[in-house]
């Protein structure tokens, strides 16, 4: 009977530790890189940016759009779910990220702190003023740029979304650029 409880504890421990997504391991083909995640084609500093967004935990997920715009020295954004309800607004600076107008199911201190820290990391991966910048491991492997910092990893490839995996809290964020069509531009 004693061994049954030990076995059952191991099973519960393994299932409880299941991850949303595993981090990409640095392989022998990896090469150091200083390439940017946020290229001008993927994030405009003067125009509104729109992304399809997925925020996923082992038990829940939010899908919708993220609208982002730079105003002075701040990035201001909103995440809106598929039904058109706002999940939250956020402001990212060189020093911090603040969540505003958070939907009630996410309006918990710990949840807001984790999401704010993840968004701060995600939007400042190319910012040399960010406190974590010198601790980043940046490399290219299999056609993707990979950035590691502690238990967080950002991956992006040509034509693929920007993905942030927070393995400490089992959260996955995915941003895929929505390219807007200019109706005034003629197709030739």
Image (tube, helix red, strand yellow):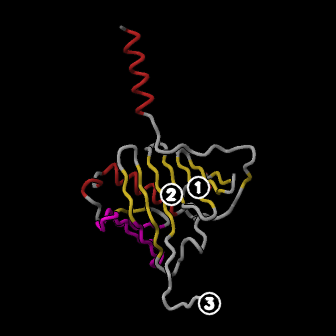
Q: Give the residue displayed 53% in from the left and 77% down from the top.
A: 45
Q: Is residue 128 visible?
A: no
Q: Tag 1, which secondary structure?
A: strand
Labels 1 and 3 touching (C-beta < 8 A): no
| Residue depicted at x 57% and y 64% | 129
Q: Residues within 10 Å of mark 1 (few under 14, many from 20)?
A: many
Figure check: 59 above or below 47: above
Disc 1 to disc 2, how far (Cα)? Answer: 13 Å
Q: Nearer the viewer, mark 2 or mark 3?
A: 3
Q: Secondary structure at mark 2?
A: helix
Name the residue beneath numbered marker 1: 155
Residue at image position (35%, 44%) is 59
Q: Quadrant of residue 79?
A: bottom left
Residue on which disc 2 sits? 121
Q: Main secondary structure of the magenta part?
A: strand
Q: Dot 2, crowdedness within 10 Å: few (<14), some or many (≥20)?
A: many
The residue positioned farthest toward the left in the image shown: 104
Identify the residue shown where x is 35% and y is 62%: 99
Image position, residue 43 (x, y; %)? 54, 72
Q: N-terminal of the two: label 1 or label 3?
A: 1
Distance between mark 2 and mark 3 Cα atoms: 41 Å
Any magenta on residue 59? no
Residue 98: % across, % down: 38, 63
Relative side of 44 to 157, left or right: left
Quadrant occupied by the N terminus:
top left
Report, in whole angstroms, how far the alpha carbon at label 1 lies from the one at label 3.
35 Å
On the image, numbered disc 3 is attached to which residue?
Answer: 188
Quadrant of residue 162 within the rendered picture: bottom right
């Amino acid at each position: 009977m004693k061994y049954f409880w030990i076995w059952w504890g191991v099973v519960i421990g393994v299932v409880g530790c299941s991850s949303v997504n595993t981090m990409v391991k640095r392989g022998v083909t990896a090469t150091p890189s200083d390439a940017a995640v946020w290229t001008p084609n993927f994030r405009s500093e003067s125009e509104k940016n729109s992304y399809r967004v997925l925020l996923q935990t082992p038990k829940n997920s939010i899908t919708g759009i993220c609208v982002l715009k730079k105003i002075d020295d701040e990035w201001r954004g909103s995440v809106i779910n598929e039904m058109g309800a706002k999940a939250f607004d956020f402001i990212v600076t060189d020093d911090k990220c603040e969540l505003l107008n958070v939907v009630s199911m996410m309006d918990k201190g710990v949840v807001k702190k984790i999401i704010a820290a993840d968004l701060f990391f995600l939007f400042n991966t190319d910012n040399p003023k960010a406190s974590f910048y010198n601790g980043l491991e940046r490399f290219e492997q299999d056609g993707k740029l990979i950035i590691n910092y502690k238990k967080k990893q950002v991956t992006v490839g040509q034509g693929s979304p920007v993905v942030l995996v927070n393995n400490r809290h089992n959260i996955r964020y995915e941003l895929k650029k929505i390219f807007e069509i200019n109706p005034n531009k003629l197709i030739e």
